[in-house]
Image: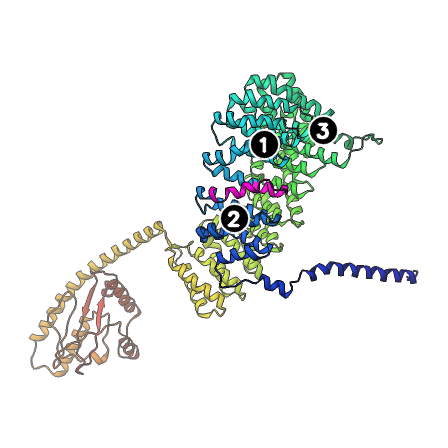
Amino acid sequence: MRPIIFSKMDFSHSIFGYIEDLQELTIIERPVRRSLKTPEEIERLTVDEELSDIERAVYLLSSGQDIQGTSVVANLPVLMRQNPAETLRRVLPKIREVLHVAGVEMQLTAAVSFLTVLQEESVSIHTYSHSFLHIILQNLEHRDAGVSNAWLETLLAVIEALPKETVRHEILNPLVSKAQLSQTLQSRLVSCKIIGKVANKFEAHIVKREVLPLVKSLCQDVEYEVRTCMCRQLEHVARGIGTELTKTVVLSELVELARDEGSSVRLAAFETLVNLLDMFDADDRSQTVLPLVKSFCEKSFKTDESILVSLSFHLGKLCNGLYGIFTPEQHLRFLEFYKKLSTLGLQQENGHNDNQLHLQTLEQEKKYISVRKNCAYNFPAMIVFVDPKNFHLELYSIFFCLCHDPEIPVRYTMAISFFEVAKLLNSDVYTIHKELVTLLQDESLEVLDALVGHLPEILELMTNGGENNGSESKLLSIPDLIPALTTAEQRAATSLKWRTHEKLLQKYACLPHIIPSDQIYYRFLHRMLTIILTNNVLPVQKAAARTLCVYLRYNRKQEQRHEVIQKLIEQLGQGKSYWNRLRFLDTCEFIMELFSKSFFCKYFFLPVLELTHDPVANVRMKLCCLLPKVKSTLKIPTDKHLLQQLELCIRKLLCQEKDKDVLTIVKRTVLELDRIEISVDAEQLEKEKQKNEGRSTNINDKIFEKKRRDSKTSSVLSKSINLSISGSSSGTLAGKEEKKSKLVRSQSFSTQVLHPKYSNIDKCPNKSSATGYTSSVPGIGKSCMLSFSDDSFRTHSAGNSGNAAFPSSSSRNLFNSADQKNNGNKESQSRKMSIGTGQGSHRAVCTFVFSQESGK
């Protein structure tokens, strides 16, 4: 390997090259230095801050620099909104003075500002015409063509709003002198455009008397620019004067202009003729228009190629407009002419002639591309012209050529019009399936983007449009359609045009209506999940997530569904990347949109709530924003446990959240959650109601049985008490205590046992009531009640288990009885015993409530 040797000359040359580059940089920097303002200039640009807006505007227009005056003119609409009277009195006259010597920038700004004031209707149209119209008319003939056109556009907009009388006196009358041959070219061009606008403003007889003479004069002007401009305004004039005058006046002028020596004049005459076809009757079309059109077509290839582009653009409208007067020969002739235009410029390229005698210039190539593009634009109209039934015989070869055209603009236009072609073909749409696959696999993403716009409609027509041709053609079309769709998506994914990729994924949501579920599962669904996990563009990820949810929605195989759901939860909801967890929340939002509430609650409710513990604040923040939608999926009483989980998560966030931004959103979310009403599952409520009614019926039966038993027990108890009293009065004290304890035991029906501290009862009641038994303690005027619900009573009972014990069944009976009493069950039977504690004011209450079960 030879060493690299730098010669002295090379080194010096490189040094000098660098020096020249540095000198160029210094030249570039010089204008920047010169643009800096000196202190004197800054002083002149400084304005007193205490001045009002009107005073500042007047000051800047009077003594300020051009840039400051332009700023005031640009701010004119704002001043008109704030203080229209003072602006018209003080600012507008200054603007009129300045515009006489103003530069181009201020003139253009003024034209735009005047138009804005008109559109915003800051003042009445009468005031506007009085104040602004004269300034507009004065600047119409500005020496700069751009400025003149800007003021003309403003004037044309003003004419539409002005009253007829104002237009007639201020615009139409002066127009007679402005349109004279002695006026400047710019003045006559302006007159042509004003005539086109004014013609629709007045009645036909006024236009005939005052406007048509000017029209004829300008159509015969010596300058071809004026004739061209007036020719393009003849369409507006014709609409204003009606059909009769159009045939007698306008048509004759068009015929003469169509034979003009200037190519631009002929082109304008041709386009105006095509636009006015609907105003001519059959005789005018066959005797006047058709010969002119045939002449244009013949000359376009031989002597006047300048008209080719326009002719190709209007050919579809022309053929259908003259359809009724064509003979079969003329019909075929125009069809052949269209075919020739569709392949214009491709003969030499597709041929194998090495000795090309006619080399195309770059300008010709552009022209031919435009012609073929216009043919693609007119293709649907040509299908109507030949009848869709004759498409395969007459136009399929042209359709094939245009879809395979070497130039992108032609294929792009075909992709845009593909849907219209498919609609027109209807049942014969299967014939263009191959071209659909070709455009889907096109190397240009612009073509793919144009086709994707109506892809769902096209695919639906492709699969449902060919019923009359049997199902075999449809079944055979799918195998090559699926690879084309996957190839299109992969090519869009590898490009930098993410909007095309997003659009494609959104449109692929239609595939469940087109392609079998298994094909979608294996060819598209997993691809969507991969895009969500690997793509870096958020809109693309969201589009893939929504399309995946659509695929899941139409998948009826439970094992495939469960697999996808599991992957969503594990790879997204429990993914290591917080970005994936955010996309999981996006996916859940789409699931709530597309699926039923029960489906979301069954599979995704709890995985979503788990993200309340996410370590990344952005995830928790997004979750909080989603919680109101999550709550709206719940139904009561079915999802009562899920509602409790949601409330628990909110409570934890409020108590444990440390990030202030998340906490702010949590508080706002709580308010939103309070406003959301949970839907009620009426069917489930009815079932529970019926179940509760059945249970209450059983309880009522038990209560009735309990009452019957209690009545028997009460009678036996009364007899035993009477026998005890009539017994030997000389019984010992121990005998009395034994009787008392037996009486207490009989009152408890062997179901409950009193605490020993309450067992010393002097006397037992002899009378009973429906609610229970009451015992008064001697020596204490007040009695108090003891309840099993009292905590102290439960504690003592448990603490003295050796002396008294509560069986577990009795405890359940007590709580069941208490529940029945709280629920308003009036049939529950309670027995109360008032026992004095003997401590004066301190009292304890014990209520014995016996349910039906406790009496068993």
Q: Is residue 696 magenta?
A: no
For image coordinates 47% across by 42% down, the residue present is 130
- Could you say which is closer to the camera, residue 277 or residue 224? 224
Circle 1 residue: 179
Of pointers 2 and 3, the one earlier in the residue sequence = 3
Q: The N terminus lies in which quarter of the figure?
A: bottom right
Checking the image for residue 305, the label placed there is: 3
Residue 102 on image: x %, y % = 60, 49
Q: Is residue 438 visible?
A: no
Query: Under tag 1, what secondary structure?
Result: loop
- Could you say which is closer to the camera, residue 284 or residue 154? 154
Mark 3: few/some/many CA within 10 Å (<14, 14-19, 20+): some
Q: Is residue 489 visible?
A: yes
Of pointers 1 and 2, the one earlier in the residue sequence = 1
For image coordinates 51% across by 21% down, the residue present is 244
| Amino acid marked by disc 3 | Glu
Q: Is residue 262 above or below residue 530?
A: above
- Could you say which is closer to the camera, residue 278 or residue 200? 200
> From the viewer's perspective, is 831 left or right of 490?
left
Q: Is residue 134 magenta?
A: yes
Residue 582: which quarter of the image? bottom right
Q: CA distance from mark 1 to mark 2?
A: 81 Å
